[in-house]
Image (spheres, rainbow, N blue to C red):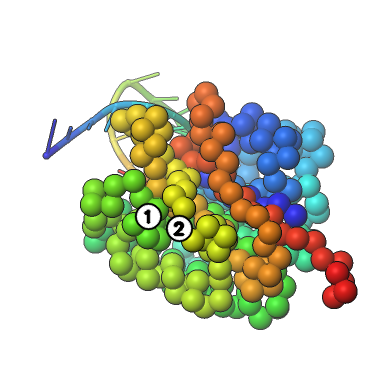
Amino acid sequence: MRIASWNVNSAKARIDHIRDWFAAGGADVLLLQEIKSQNESFPFDVFAEMGWHVAVHGQKSYNGVAIVSRYPIENVMCGLPGDPSDEQARYIEATIKNTRVVSIYLPNGNPAPGPKFDYKLAWMKRLYLRSQALLADEIPVVLGGDFNVIPQDIDCYDPPGWVGDALTRSESRSAFFKICYGGYTDALRALNPSGVYYTYWDYQAGAWQRDNGIRIDHLLLSPEAGDKLVAVGVDRGPRGLEKPSDHTPIWCELAVRRSRAN
DNA sequence: ATGCCCCCGTCCCGGGGA
């Protein structure tokens, strides 16, 4: 089963890209972020016409996450536990074929320091707690999304230029690696320890043409999911289309094992 | 040094993005 994550920067503006990429076999399960749409105005009809399943946690104008799947979606949970006053739509969980998948749109946190950075760190603490709770079921778990964290300098085209930014600050990186050290594997780094991969290029200053990118979209795998990891990649294709999102999809392939005797 | 670009709303600017 192929699982992908893609910050599409508006579901409505990108609906053709989403449909075409998914129809072409880009993934079996697609975790979307920044759909920038409330549930009432989400383009459900497009997915229904294609026979795909979809779960949406929307919000007006900003944020918003969703899950698109070729297989039935069960036990949907909207919102990251731990703060009932948090009304931003940045988290959705569901079970698909005995795998728990999560679409995450982690707060940016700039300017840092400041209240937005505090919100980011508090959100990451809640995410760590939830990630630990998810391990208890001992089924494959995939935490996918726009984490708004550049884990290492290798993941940035210009590390000196990003010093002090909320995406590279030590507090952000520590919170990211705390989730990893807690039992989750960065799928891309598991198979490519030292390669340069970017998932985001700014719209401005010719960043795409100059390959001035950063790696902030990640797929984190529980031990049960990591055991099944057979391939991972970043598909740069959609970033080169007309009117693209500023992010491009990252995907991983998890092997299907029917029994212990395989 | 600053801003470039893009999306949303009920809108012709401002907020937010990263």
Q: Chain of mark 1?
A: A
Give the mark nearer the N terminus: 2 vs 1: 1
Closest to the observer, A247 or A258: A258
Q: Chain of mark 2?
A: A
Q: Is residue A137 above or below residue A239?
A: below
Quadrant where the C terminus of chain A sits is: bottom right
Badge 1, how many Cα within 10 Å: few under 14, some, many 20+?
some
Closest to the observer, A189 or A138: A189
Badge 2, how many Cα within 10 Å: few under 14, some, many 20+?
few
Q: Are marks 2 and 1 in contact (CB under 8 Å)?
A: yes
Q: Quadrant of residue A40?
A: top right
Q: Position of residue A195 (x, y in %)?
A: 46, 53
Q: Amino acid at mark 2?
A: Ser
Q: State the CA–CA distance, disc 2 to disc 1.
A: 8 Å
Asked whether, in this view, residue A196 is left or right of residue A50, the answer is: left
Q: Is residue A148 above or below residue A24?
A: below
Closest to the observer, A43 or A107: A107
Question: Is residue A240 visible to us here?
Answer: yes
Q: Which disc number belongs to residue A194?
A: 2
Element at label 2 = loop
Q: Which residue is mark 1?
A: A154
Asked whether, in this view, residue A235 is left or right of residue B13, the answer is: right
Q: Position of residue A112 (x, y in %)?
A: 26, 58
Residue at 67% of width from left, 62% of height from top? Answer: A229
Q: Amino acid at mark 1?
A: Ile
Q: Is residue A144 above or below residue A258?
A: above
Q: Position of residue A202 (x, y in %)?
A: 38, 37
Q: Which disc number belongs to residue A243?
A: none
Q: Position of residue A116 (x, y in %)?
A: 32, 58
Element at label 1 = helix
